[in-house]
Image (cartoon, rainbow, N blue to C red):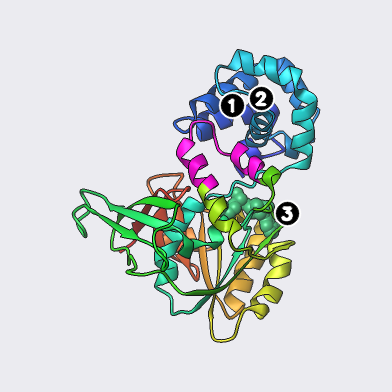
Amino acid sequence: MRESTDPLVDTSARYRAFAEVEARGMSACYERWAAGVAVDPRLVTLIDQLPPTKRQPNLLFGAARLHGAAAGEYAPFAAWLREHWADVAATCLTHVTQTNEPGRCAVLLPALAALAGPLAIIEVGASAGLCLHPDRYSYRYRFADDDAESGGGERMLHPAGGPSAVVLDCTVSGPAPLPERMPEIVWRAGIDLGPLDVQSDADVAWLEALIWPEHDDRRARLRAAVTVAREQSVEIVRGDLNDEIAALVARAPAGATVVVFHTAVLAYLNETDRLRFAAQMMRLPVRWLSNEGQSVVPGVLERLGEAPAEASAFILALDGEPIALTQPHGRSLHWLG
Ligand SMILES: C[S@@+](CC[C@H](N)C(=O)[O-])C[C@H]1O[C@@H](n2cnc3c(N)ncnc32)[C@H](O)[C@@H]1O
């Protein structure tokens, strides 16, 4: 577990780790806020009133922004947080970090489209289910200029009914099997410990607050994806993925290839539960598509052989075999040879 999310690490160290490892290069605002908290005993004392699992920077900053904290320098933020502490603490206690990033569909889609259809897709750890609509978004795949396979250029892919208001951009390298058309998805469902309701304005406001301040493109994409997802409701079963998966697989329509997928989820499980889930994926009549941090899915990094140069890269794996390296929010896809 990363230090910033590890409840056993003291608050000052968690915020320092978050500033230096996660926020640096991704959000100047969150880097300043976290670095400031790390050396501010008054705020550390305040944050330590929360249970250890609720002290994580991403949760606290998301809660602060939900209640109106303005992105900016540390000193005004610290003053604002002291003044609004009761509201922020209450939100931390009732919420968890459930960032739902539809951009991840861009790295899932080529793998889904390469499977024999029609498909019945099940996302475990679905949050609000925005990744359960990969066939309803448009894609702009840009080939890296120096990519030997393609030599640059781009490829657009649209839903069967025409272009979507959601256009997902993804830079591609390696021999990615980019599809000519969308996979046929005949059934879809999800599982989450606490599903967010895409129809609920409060839940969508929380999803927006979880997007880091400078990531305006992601906020715009989230709003557009919510509009698409609101048009067709998808069932998301409430419960633990290990407990619910077999029953949900059994409900998939006969004749469809059942694909169980997950992205940025298994890091939340302990080692025992990850192994239990991997064993279920091998036993159930499904194809298993995982898109997770490098050492999260049992056996995947070992099968890759060599750790990717980019420490933050996710590994996309099909049935436990690595097939691509991906940027965690779906911005790039490097297909393995
Ligand atoms: C970071 S979010 C990712 C959401 C979505 N997969 C995406 O990529 O946009 C992780 C989600 O996994 C869910 N989750 C974590 N542990 C879980 C478990 N044991 N069973 C079901 N869902 C779980 C959380 O509630 C959260 O909604």
Q: Is residue 153 above or below residue 236?
A: above
* Mark 3 beta carbon near ligand 1 (under 8 Å): yes
What is the C-alpha distance between the residues marked 1 and 2? 6 Å
- Indicate the secondary structure of the residue bearing disc 2: helix
* Mark 1 beta carbon near ligand 1 (under 8 Å): no
Asked whether disc 1 touches disc 2, contact meaning CB atoms under 8 Å apart, the reply is yes
Between 47 and 108, the one lying in front of the other is: 108
Q: Amino acid at mark 2?
A: Ser
Magenta stretch secondary structure, dominant: helix
From the viewer's perspective, tell me whether residue 282 is left or right of residue 245: left
Quadrant housing residue 296: bottom right
| Magenta residue check for 206 | yes
Q: Mark 3 vs mark 1: which is more N-terminal?
A: 1
The residue stretch that appears in magenta:
204-223
From the viewer's perspective, tell me whether residue 65 is left or right of residue 263: right
Task: Please name the residue that numbered disc 2 is placed on.
Answer: 12
Q: Amino acid at mark 1?
A: Arg
Tell me the number on the disc at residue 194: 3
Quadrant housing residue 285: bottom right
Q: Position of residue 308 (x, y in %)?
A: 39, 50
**Circle 3 crowding by C-alpha within 10 Å: few under 14, some 14–19, many from 20:** some
Q: Position of residue 234 (x, y in %)?
A: 63, 65
Q: Is residue 297 visible?
A: no
Tell me the number on the disc at residue 16: 1
